[in-house]
Image (spheres, rainbow, N blue to C red):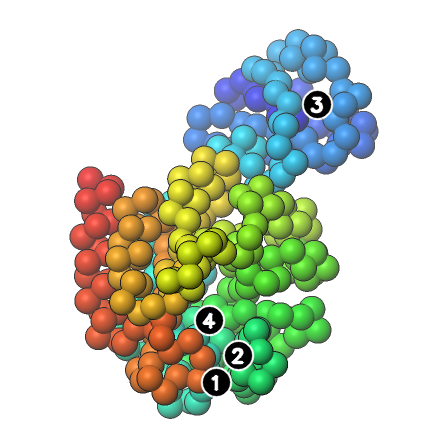
Amino acid sequence: MIVLLKPNPDKAQLDSLIKWLESKGVEIHPTVGTTQTILGLVGDTSHLDIDLISALDIVAGVRRVQEPYKNANRKFHPDDTVIKVGNTVIGGGNLTLIAGPCSVESEEQICAIAQKVKESGATLLRGGAFKPRTSPYSFQGLRDEGLKLLSVAKKLTGLPIVTEIMDIAHLDSFDDVDVIQVGARNMQNFELLKALGNTRKPILLKRGLSSTYEELLMSAEYIMAGGNNNVILCERGIRSFETYTRNTLDISAIPVLKQLSHLPVIIDPSHASGKSALVAPLACAAVAAGADGLIIEVHNDPEHALCDGPQSIRPEAFDALVKKLGRISSAVKG
């Protein structure tokens, strides 16, 4: 349920209303928007008298929210959520570029790529330390050593780190990580999501391979229910009948998620296609559709990459793409 307040509500009346609602066992989430203040009521609201609340002087209206996700719902939070990571702002009309290799392989590799993508305009560095792989015989990442090398690249370039977590047990090792990524395979790892809800680090939540929009938003709700509202949604391609591409990029996810939720939406064109030649056109399409950012795999030697080389683009290709994305972003805004 949401309670819409009239402009400039009387503070004493507002405090009294909140206290009364809380006495009914309802959790209150106030949102002060640009045009209106909203009280989001989370919990069992079936016993609340809508007519009684509507009759109060400070109340403009009351609506019941049917969707099971509350904190992630745009009805609770009409304005776009903006998340600050270092000097980078994600959401609010900004185009955020996250770039780096699929996996951290060595200090020389991650530092060289970090410097290149920063020069081209990336403001966050991605790199996998823990790698979930379909085959147990594939490269699993450098793990804690990979995290240390990401910190070296961060110190060298100033770029905040984005990297994936796979297990609650690893959380203590992520102190120097700026944005924690939850991969598609862990989107419904609810115990992990609950633990991340107790942190205040931004969480980049990837959509599962066969997950609906509502399932993605419910996973975001798990994190936000713990008090962490810094959630970034990521469409990374879904499983379909087509086998030519690694996955099928769902461009419609951008406007749909923005309609349903206030959270930033970014696109991963690398995992969506699995082919380096398709990264640029999919990235351009995503920006044209209104994405808040992109997370792109960049490698200085894709042919010899230890992980996902075929979908990684070279630094010079990333540089050219960034210039094109800037023109598209300006055209969309203009």
Badge 1 amino acid: Leu
Going from N to C along the chain, the mark reached first, 1 or 2, is 2
The residue labelled by disc 2 is: 129
Can you say whether 82 is above or below 116 in the image?
above
The residue labelled by disc 4 is: 161
| Label 4, label 2: how far apart the Cα atoms are | 11 Å
User: Can see residue 41?
Assistant: yes
| Label 3, label 4: how far apart the Cα atoms are | 43 Å
Q: Residues within 10 Å of mark 2 (few under 14, many from 20)?
A: many
The quadrant the N terminus occupies is top right
Q: Residues within 10 Å of mark 1 (few under 14, many from 20)?
A: many
The residue labelled by disc 3 is: 17
| Label 1, label 2: how far apart the Cα atoms are | 9 Å
Q: Residue at x 58, y 85 (%)?
A: 137
Q: Position of residue 2 (x, y in %)?
A: 62, 26
Label 3 sits on a secondary structure element that is helix
| Label 3, label 1: how far apart the Cα atoms are | 52 Å
Q: Nearer the viewer, residue 228 or 194?
A: 194
Indicate which disc residue 1 carries: none
Label 4 sits on a secondary structure element that is strand
**Hey, which quadrant is residue 185 in on the image?**
bottom right
Going from N to C along the chain, the mark reached first, 3 or 4, is 3
The residue labelled by disc 1 is: 149
Q: Is residue 315 left or right of residue 32?
A: left
